[in-house]
């Protein structure tokens, strides 16, 4: 009991630093000049029309960790609310560097991965990673008092680890109460506590984030067995495998979010804002 209180206290202290850098918001979707995303661009997080509203996509899109599962964009008819982008010049510089890295390194690797590794193998690897990271979702649900959701995630972990053979298969999808349970992370827990997102950030290689989510990643790491099980060599091997498995899906998301956009930076920012706000409010 005391260890749980210590973990929550540590997370609260870390998250409080966000309040020190949270400034006044700027309108997501605008920069120093008014820029609108064209009607033709659509992406994982929704399809904006000429007025900047995100419409529900006509088809379902792959989720982050499991290329087989899907979700719908609930921000179909809502205007993207303002997001603090105080570091926009810095963010745009990192965005430009990331774009070149994706173009010359990540995208070719993604194509090679898809070509060399059969899709069923990639999907199975994605499910194993998703299963291993279950403690992150369980702990984050408990931090928000979402005990039913924590129970569902625990049930998924038990079913998929046993009947699914360490998560290679996902029999939990055939159980109504365990199917399509919204994922949770520590950044979402901070949002549920009322902690503001803070300024928008673009991280090298990793891409869109916020101050709140950046601090939340520290909490995710503490809850993730990948961070504290095995030797350092084993951890590096797991991280490398995870990067290879997730890279094709990440590049597909990036392409969909920026393709045909007048300003790819703004398009990606609005996509991220909608996606994370939806995740917090679920």
Image (tube, rainbow, N blue to C red):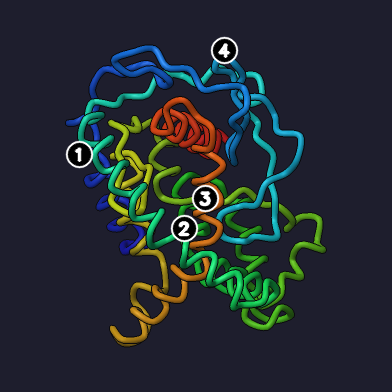
Q: Tell me which residue sits at (62%, 61%) in the image.
A: 66
Q: Give the CA separation, mark 1 to mark 2.
A: 21 Å
Q: Tell me which residue sits at (35%, 63%) in the image.
A: 221
| Residue 71 horizontal/vertical position (percent) | 68, 45
Which badge, 4 or 3, is on the more N-terminal residue?
4
Which badge, 4 or 2, is on the more N-terminal residue?
4
Q: Name the residue under label 3.
A: 184
Which badge, 1 or 2, is on the more N-terminal residue?
1
Q: Mark 1 near mark 2, Cβ–Cβ under 8 Å?
A: no
Disc 4 residue crowd, few under 14, some 14–19, many 20+, Cα 10 Å: few
Q: In which quarter of the image is residue 165?
A: bottom right
Q: Mark 1 points at which residue?
A: 17
Local secondary structure at mark 3: loop
Q: Which of 148 and 187 is in front in this view?
A: 187
Disc 1 residue crowd, few under 14, some 14–19, many 20+, Cα 10 Å: some
Q: Tell me which residue sits at (34%, 55%) in the image.
A: 101
Disc 3 residue crowd, few under 14, some 14–19, many 20+, Cα 10 Å: many
Q: In which quarter of the image is residue 213?
A: top left
| Residue 142 horizontal/vertical position (percent) | 49, 52
Which mark identifies residue 139?
Answer: 2
Q: Give the CA separation, mark 4 to mark 1.
A: 35 Å
């Amino acid at each position: 009991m005391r260890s749980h209180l210590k973990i929550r206290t540590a997370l609260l202290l870390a998250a409080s630093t966000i309040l020190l850098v949270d400034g006044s918001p700027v309108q997501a979707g605008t920069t120093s000049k008014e820029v609108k995303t064209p009607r033709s661009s659509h992406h994982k997080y929704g399809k904006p029309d000429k007025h900047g509203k995100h419409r529900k996509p006509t088809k379902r899109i792959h989720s982050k960790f499991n290329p087989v599962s899907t979700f719908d964009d609930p921000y179909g008819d809502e205007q993207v609310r303002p997001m603090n982008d105080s570091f926009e010049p810095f963010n745009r510089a990192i965005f430009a560097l990331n774009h070149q890295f994706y173009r010359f390194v990540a995208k070719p690797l993604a194509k090679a991965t898809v070509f060399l590794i059969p899709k069923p193998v990639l999907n199975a690897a994605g499910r194993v990673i998703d299963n291993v990271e279950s403690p992150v979702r369980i702990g984050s649900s408990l931090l928000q008092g979402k005990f039913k959701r924590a129970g569902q995630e625990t049930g998924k972990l038990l079913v998929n680890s046993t009947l699914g053979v360490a998560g290679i298969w996902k029999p939990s999808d055939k159980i109504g109460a365990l199917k399509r349970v919204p994922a949770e992370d520590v950044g979402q827990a901070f949002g549920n506590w009322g902690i503001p997102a803070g300024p928008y950030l673009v991280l090298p290689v990793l891409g869109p984030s916020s101050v709140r989510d950046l601090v939340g990643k520290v909490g995710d790491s503490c809850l993730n067995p990948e961070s504290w099980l095995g030797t350092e060599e084993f951890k590096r091997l797991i991280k490398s495998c995870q990067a290879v498995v997730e890279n094709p899906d990440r590049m597909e998301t990036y392409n969909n979010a920026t393709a045909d956009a007048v300003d790819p930076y703004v398009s990606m920012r609005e996509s991220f804002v909608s996606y994370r706000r939806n995740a917090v409010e679920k």
